[in-house]
Image (cartoon, helix red, strand yellow):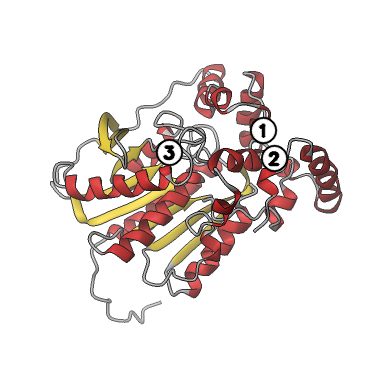
Amino acid sequence: MTDSHLQPANQNRADDSIGRIAELIGGDPMSRMDADMKHVLDGLAEMGARPLELLSPEMARRQPRSTEAISAILGRQGRERPEDGVEAEDITITGAEGDLPGRVYRPLGLLSRLNPVVLYFHGGGFVTGDLDSHDASARAIARRSGAIVVSVAYRLAPEHQFPAAHDDAWAAWRWLTTEIKTLTGDPQRLAVAGEDAGGNLAANVALRARDEGGAQPVHQLLIHPIAGTNMTTASYGQMLRARPIGLPAMRWRFRQIFSEEAEAGDERINLVARGDWAAVASATLILAEIDPLRSEGEALADALEQAGVAVNCWTYAGVTQGFFGLGLVVTKALFAQSDAADALGKAFAPARPSPAPNHHH
């Protein structure tokens, strides 16, 4: 375990020189960015977005968001946000230490009393993010998979440090399994999903559900999950100056999350170090090329596979952390949403007997 996340701000100067060396060897990762992804980040910069590591958590939460950049881009193009055929309702979810805001997304026209349900945890590195910041991701999963999506606003650091978010995630899962009939959900077809911090929470729920018995998720959709605190991985080395999230931003996040250094080694954060993945729910990992979390996502996919878990792991070139919900502007987000929905659809499909071999090729 390195203590790099606790080093002071003057570390940024060292990062910069290492970053320049990495760029000389591997090329600047930002130069490989898709034009439509760059369009969103440029829009954010025009709106005054600044690197996380320069901000307080309160300032970071008030930063311009991708959703606002998308609205501005659509406005300039004379496009309206299309109707997406999903209705959303704000609800209250029972957290570990009190009620949490939640939102239920239902594809229009659901007739069944037994629908698949995805419990979704937003991104933001355990410090930022809420129901609104990742509304587009939750909507896309609902629209494309036909599942009901329940998004939960778990408590954030530094006001609520580790493991508050993990405790809330598990409480939300317990709440979901008890309320499933009220939500017109099918208790046999539940999945967990999340982005970066939320991907970590989703994986933790899948592990704990396996250990504690009771209702099990049939799939875990992990979108560039935080799976460790090791900042010496290959992708961290390549992404020292990546935007919107590079190494300094991740170090800033970890500084908010942990009250003491030893917690950074906890196996709930260091998923890649765990050897106990056997019999956990099948998984889909959606990784972004321009993201310090890419290497640990690959390592997590390997760990799952070695434990005999069915895994899809796809890396989308030319996009950054936070791309998944940007489908109105970013083409790779549409691909990722489609791949995610396909994986969920397969996991939700009733188990069928194997068809007889087909010899007509």
Front residue of 166 and 313: 166
User: Mark 3 against mark 1, which lies toward the viewer?
Assistant: 1
Front residue of 257 and 184: 257
Badge 3: how crowded within 10 Å, few (<14), some, or many (20+)?
many
How far apart in space, not on screen, are marks 2 and 3 (Cα)? Answer: 25 Å
The picture quadrant where one finds residue 220 is: bottom left
Kindly state the secondary structure of the residue where label 2 is placed. helix
Question: Residue 320: horizontal and vertical position, in percent?
Answer: 61, 42
Question: Residue 299: horizontal and vertical position, in percent?
Answer: 58, 63
The picture quadrant where one finds residue 153 is: top left
Which kind of residue does numbered mark 3 sit on? Ser
Q: Are marks 1 and 2 in contact (CB under 8 Å)?
A: yes
In the image, residue 257 above or below residue 65: below
How far apart in space, not on screen, are marks 3 and 1 (Cα)? Answer: 25 Å
Residue at the disc numbered 2: 248
User: Mark 2 against mark 3, which lies toward the viewer?
Assistant: 2
